[in-house]
Amino acid sequence: MKRYKLLSNQVFIENRKRFASTLAKNSIAIFNSNEVIPKNGDAYYDFKQNSDMFWLTGIDQEECAVVIFPDCAIPAYREALFIKRTNEHIAVWDGHKYTKQEATEASGIENVFWMDEFDGMIRAIVNMAERIYLNTNENDRASSTVPYKDLRFIDEMRQRFPLHQYERAAPMLQRLRSVKSTLEIEYMKHAIEISNQMFLRVLKFVKPGVKEYEIEAEVIHEFIRNGARGHSFSPIVAAGKNACTLHYIDNADTCNDGDLLLLDTGAEYGNYISDMTRTFPINGKFTARQKAVYNAVLRVMRAAKSMLKPGVMLMEYHAEVCKIMEQELIQLGLISVDDIKNQNPAWPAFKKYFMHGTSHFLGLDVHDVGMRYEPMKAGMMFSCEPGIYIPEEGIGIRLENEILITDNGCIDLMEHIPIEADHIETLMHQ
């Protein structure tokens, strides 16, 4: 039993068809689930499925694998799913695991085997293939040095089958996963609505003197009560000057009268995520300076959204956003025309106050996979999150919505969530 409504297995059937169509002739592709990672003692981190494995199968469990071999002479191995063999002991201590029938219902794969049969079966069919497609984490933001399951599996396969031609599955999946199906979009809309409910709750709660971690507690309360698994990333609850630290996650400070609060959070629902940022006054009223900076960020956000459409290149789009941000920073008195004329091209003047990107891919991961040097396509989902950070004034403002690219431009899926400064003030004083 999952706390979220299961996606129709037709989503995963179609995903596998799309992936299989990209394989070279007479190729086999193998994907593994993530592992349960030990924490300390006999404790483990919460399990989070490998996003590629979930996208292909809908299986949300450890110790599983899927084999895709469209040209296999044995029909049972053209699509084969391997799941953890359970027993009474596991059921008593760790809970229910997929039965073969449940795995078929979730994935649409008819041929389901136990994971302890994998080594023997794979040996019987790999030699029928000329190429082996294996998976790695090629997200261009990844920086982990941990030897995770996929890397160890690659080493094992190369030792066992050294004369095969090995191929990368990740580039194909990055392109496929970045274009969302209708049902995937509906799941992400559900996660977005959970974020909306959370924000309305927080606006009623925040006041001078509360701790950032108390606000974090309100966030997770609303996420969980609405069926989310939890946070889609470590929440940023940053009061005052803390908002000028982009990845501030201590959430331990006091919210002081007269300061702003930057709240960057996301809910995870059915493995899909939301990602939203709002900044608002702790006492319910913006100062004139805070509102001026806030409205500047909001204008940049709206200008940026208007540029998002099929055919746009992400990096060129960001460069145009930065030009708009320059003008806003000039109007705010933060930089001058001379600063821009005399700037170091490697570190333009605007970067003192706006040092991060405008948009990133969204989906199964908060920084989802996608080809950032290829044109945008309908069905892609992006954040839009400009910000201005002024440490010397203790002001850090970022606003972030989720944007769906369509054939005719884009749709802001968070347009209904309060963002106008006056609207936020009204809600906080109700």
Image (cartoon, helix red, strand yellow):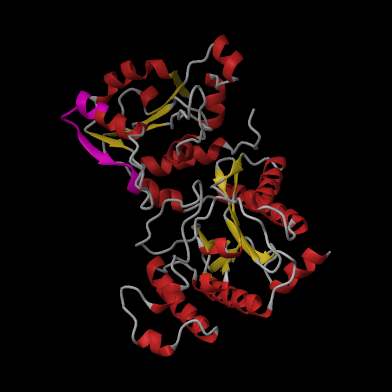
Q: Is residue 274 above or below residue 132?
A: below
Q: Is 384 located above or below residue 134 in the figure?
A: below
Please provide percent x and percent y for residue 357. Answer: 44, 65
Q: Which quarter of the rendering shows the C terminus?
A: bottom right
**Residue 96, horizontal then vertical, whole percent:** 59, 20
Residue in the image at 58% along x and 47% along y: 183
Can you tell which quarter of the image residue 283 is in?
A: bottom right
Q: Position of residue 379 (x, y in %)?
A: 50, 57
**Residue 71 % position (x, y):** 31, 32
Based on the picture, tell me whether residue 165 belongs to the magenta stretch: yes
Left or right: 380 with respect to 183? left
Residue 213 showing in the rendered view: yes
Q: Which of 226 and 337 is in front in this view?
A: 337
Residue found at the very far left of the displayed protein = 163
Query: Is residue 81 found inside the magenta-colored segment of the image?
Result: no
Near-viewer residue (224 or 408): 224
- Identify the residue at image location x=28%, y=18%: 124
Above or below, 102 relative to 406: above
**Closest to the observer, 412 or 211:** 211
Q: Give the range drawn in magenta.
A: 156-171
Q: As drawn, is 298 to the left or to the right of 72?
A: right
